[in-house]
Amino acid sequence: RGSRMIEEASDELQCDMCEAVVRELHAEVYRHDIVAKNGEEGILDTVEAVCLAVVQNYTLTNDGDESTGYRMMPAPRLPSGQIDESKLNFGLLMRLKELCLHTTGTMAVSLSEAMYTAVRRKTPAATLARGFCFDQDEGLCRHFVDPDEDKWDSGVMPRVLERAKKKKELKKKK
């Protein structure tokens, strides 16, 4: 049943997962100074482990109606900042973990390369998430990108926007 959930994960859910993985990995890489200690290989080793941080900080919800699909939400917290375990659905957390492992498995190498470059350039997590996840060729959020939309390039890495526009121009010429 879990693998069916991955196969049927909506574009929005896959996009949410991509952004969560990038943000959590960015935090882990900085928190543990991974680039200085182990370089790009250290980041690659951390990619799959980042799912622990994702499961700790997010949850899935479908508001009780599986026909509406799942959405990622921040994990419910108590006023103390601790996770409110009474409001968690552990079956959905296992699905979240499975989706995270699937996602990181498909993008581990490209994400570690992008993360290494971003850390060396001191690129903020939000900018990296937009640039990586919304990449026209491979990004899990590419379904939501219209390169002709002026609003799209605000904050997104310029090379990603430029590549998207070139690709669209080439299609028009054919």
Image (spheres, rainbow, N blue to C red):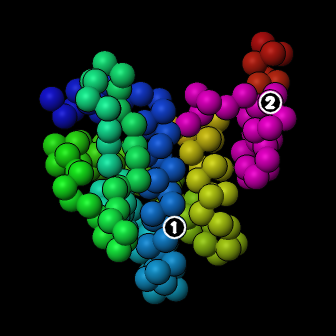
Residues packed near mark 2 inside 10 Å, few (<14), some (14 to 19) or many (20 plus): few
Where's residue 99, x and y in %? Answer: 30, 43
Where's residue 109, x and y in %? Answer: 45, 55
Looking at the rendered structure, the secondary structure element under dot 2 is loop
When the figure is inspected, residue 129 is found, relative to residue 123, above or below; the finding is above
Looking at the rendered structure, the secondary structure element under dot 1 is helix
Quarter of the rendering containing residue 136: top right
Marking on residue 149: 2
Dot 1 or dot 2: first in sequence order is 1
x 28%, y 24%: residue: 65
Quarter of the rendering containing residue 98: top left
* Amino acid at dot 1: His
Where's residue 105, x and y in %? Answer: 34, 49
When the figure is inspected, residue 84 is found, relative to residue 8, above or below; the finding is below
Marking on residue 96: none
Label 1, on which residue?
26
* Amino acid at dot 2: Glu
x 65%, y 50%: residue: 131
| Left or right relative to 163: residue 85 | left
| Residue 102 seen from this side | no
The residue closer to the viewer here, 4 or 169, is: 4
Where's residue 112, x and y in %? Answer: 49, 62
The residue closer to the viewer here, 60 or 136, is: 60
Is residue 147 within the magenta segment?
Answer: yes
Location of the C terminus by quadrant is top right
Which segment did they paint magenta? 141-164
Is residue 162 within the magenta segment?
Answer: yes
Instruction: Give the distance between the C-alpha atoms of the residues marked 1 and 2, in whole angstroms.
Output: 28 Å
Residues packed near mark 1 inside 10 Å, few (<14), some (14 to 19) or many (20 plus): many
